[in-house]
Image (cartoon, rainbow, N blue to C red):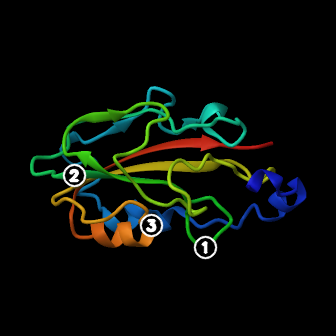
Amino acid sequence: MLEHVPAFLGRALKSVRAGHGKLAVARLADETTLGAGGFALTSGAFEDGEPLDPMFTADEEDACAPPLAWTAPPAGTRELALIVEDPDAPSPQPLVHLLGWGFEGGAGEMFEGDDPPMIGLNSFNQAGWLPPDPPTGHGAHDYVFQLFALDAPLALGAGAGRGALLDAIEGHVLAAAVLTGTYERD
């Protein structure tokens, strides 16, 4: 994974980043849906904008997804979908760390290490959590957890990729909640 990128190359690529404007939430939400009705996403493992514990990253052999909790979404929510992306990856699109959907349309939580009810493929074409793994010397990366409240259930099978999930969600977002953790290798 990216921890094997030499530090000199990480430093050389420091300005090469996908960008926050390419996050799923930038495509699917707007100022009226972001946090609509008080919809919020939190974690007992980190505060918004704070560093992730290494236990959730590729620096730990048995890394797992952090716990998440969310408040009740707006009325009419039929399903929730979760997308975790790194917009600071040295790639044309954000690196996908987790795609999940099938969450019931109410307040809820995902415990540490749990998988969503339906799991899509991360950027390494694997189902499940792709531990954060920024290149050494590349600087801090944001890991943006994006939860979408949808007005219809998704007709997607397990193993769908980012493009298929975004297409299925588009036009169905009642609210979105965002939580950002950071991670950096010196």
Q: In this view, does 175 lie above or below 20?
A: above
* Residue drawn at (30%, 65%) of the image: 156
Q: Classify mark 1: helix, strand or loop.
A: loop
Q: Do the residues labelled 3 and 1 touch (CB within 8 Å)?
A: no
Q: Which of 119 and 18 is in front in this view?
A: 119
- Amino acid type at mark 2: Glu
Question: What residue did someone put label 1 on?
Answer: 92
Q: Residues within 10 Å of mark 2 (few under 14, many from 20)?
A: many
The mark that comes first in sequence, 3 or 1, is 1
* Residue drawn at (61%, 61%) of the image: 124
Q: Residues within 10 Å of mark 3 (few under 14, many from 20)?
A: some
* Residue drawn at (49%, 50%) of the image: 144
**Disc number placed over residue 162 in the picture, else none:** 3
Residue 160 point in image, percent of width and height: 41, 66
* Residue drawn at (80%, 42%) of the image: 186
Q: Residues within 10 Å of mark 1 (few under 14, many from 20)?
A: few
Question: What residue did someone put label 2 on?
Answer: 79
The mark closer to the camera, 2 or 1, is 2
**Residue lying furthest top in this view?**
44
Residue 167 point in image, percent of width and height: 33, 73
Q: In this view, does 4 lie to the left or right of 30?
A: right
Q: Is residue 142 left or right of residue 105?
A: right
Q: Classify mark 2: helix, strand or loop.
A: strand
**Residue 37 makes an appearance in the image:** yes
